[in-house]
Image (tube, grey):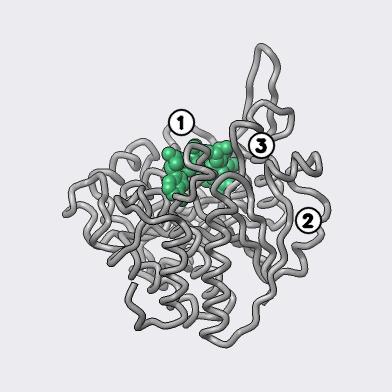
Amino acid sequence: MKIAVLPGDGIGPETTRVALDVLHAAAAAHGFAVEVSEHPFGGNAIDSHGDPFPAETRAALPGADAVLKGAVGGPQWDVGAIRPEQGLLALRAELAAFANVRPIRLWSSKLESPLRPELVEGLDVIIIRELTGGLYFGPKELTDETGMDTCRYSAEEVERVCRYAFELARTRSGRVCSVDKQNVLSSSKLWRQVVTERVAPDYPDVEVSHQLVDSMAMKLIEQPTAYDVIVTENMFGDILSDLAASVSGGIGLAPSSSLGATRPGLYEAIHGSAPDIAGRGIANPTAMVLTVAMMLRDLGERAAGDAVEAAAVHCLEHGPTTPDLGGSASTDEVGAAIAARVRDPEVTA
Ligand code: NAD
Ligand code: IPM
Ligand code: MN
């Protein structure tokens, strides 16, 4: 398999390096070949190329089976005319990666949620976040007097991401909760109408519910295990998934894939470049490792993906862990322990 790697900024390169070590360990243990190429992207690419998504990076994507990306951004690029995050939006658009799959799971009972243990026991939710429409991509304006972003969705954009969610629900418990703000927003009125009239009738076996986004934030705190597949628009999904990741034990644990109709898919953790801890070697690499597990499964290496996930979970259960989880290990120590277990599932950490 050919993987285009965009290491990114801040803890991006630190966690991506671990993810690649684990990927290579999985390739060796499961007998498949992996070809990795690295490309500038994000803030570092602004510095080197004056562009967060340089032409040479863009040109490398069609030949790849998957794109593995570290987080981008940082305070040094917050003030410039062009930002790393613009590159990220352009990348998602370039790949037409409209379905952002964000599994939120209590990966280990040892993890400490800010919620009481009984509220999160068995937590296993997948948030499907629409990724190429809405406020992020609608018409914008910024003057000294006015700032404007437009949340615009077409019925087709809503339909394709919701169909993805309904198909996924069929492989799970058969429940979809669609989140909107249809009491106020036109884009949300359309969203709910499309779910109700165009999508749900084709899935009589899937139980659909609707929830307004403000009360959904509340429900995810009060009763997070009540949900299975959640589907929502871009901005709501961004916010709810950080909240849900925290509920599951921390942002350093949450992986994601961003998929369109064709390959390559984009694989990235949901956390950012964590400028507050970057360069200290203490970032939690688990989210990026679990992201590799998702990537391997999508590329047909199911056993390898399962082994990577199992090794990461074993490490959460038995250590070592990074300081965000109460441990004292470095990013690389956690990575080495996971890679060792991928090579030999019997090895004790
Ligand atoms: P963040 O996710 O980077 O950090 C929030 C908090 O979580 C910080 O305290 C950080 O130390 C901690 N954290 C995050 N990931 C961690 C990990 N793996 N291990 C341990 N702790 C971790 O969010 P932010 O501070 O709001 O954003 C920082 C920058 O990252 C911004 O420039 C933002 O635009 C960017 N960002 C990029 C992506 C991406 O590239 N996919 C995603 C989110 C944010
Ligand atoms: C994420 C991030 C990005 C987003 C930013 C960095 C553009 O927060 O991947 O969740 O808002 O989509
Ligand atoms: Mn986010």
Task: Of the two numbered discs 1 and 2 on the same chain, state the one appearing first in sequence.
Answer: 2
Identify residue for label 1: 184
How far is the residue under mark 3 from the one under mark 2? 23 Å
The residue nearer to you, when weighing 165 against 54, is: 54
The 10 Å Cα crowd at callout 1, few under 14, some 14 to 19, many 20 or more, is few
The residue nearer to you, when weighing 65 against 330, is: 330
Rendered-image quarter of ligand 2: top right
Residue at image position (47%, 82%) is 303
Residue at image position (26%, 49%) is 113
How far is the residue under mark 1 from the one under mark 2? 38 Å
* Helix, strand or loop under label 2: helix
Q: Position of residue 116 (x, y in %)?
A: 18, 48
The residue nearer to you, when weighing 103 against 99, is: 103
How far is the residue under mark 3 from the one under mark 1? 18 Å
Q: Position of residue 8 (x, y in %)?
A: 63, 50
Q: Position of residue 59 (x, y in %)?
A: 82, 59
* Helix, strand or loop under label 1: loop
Q: As shown in the figure, which amino acid type bears the numbered disc 2? A: Arg
Extreme residue in the top direction: 145
Identify residue for label 2: 58
Residue at image position (53%, 77%) is 25
Specify the label residue 302 is tagged with.
Answer: none
Quadrant including the C terminus: bottom left
Identify residue for label 3: 138
Q: Position of residue 182 (x, y in %)?
A: 45, 38
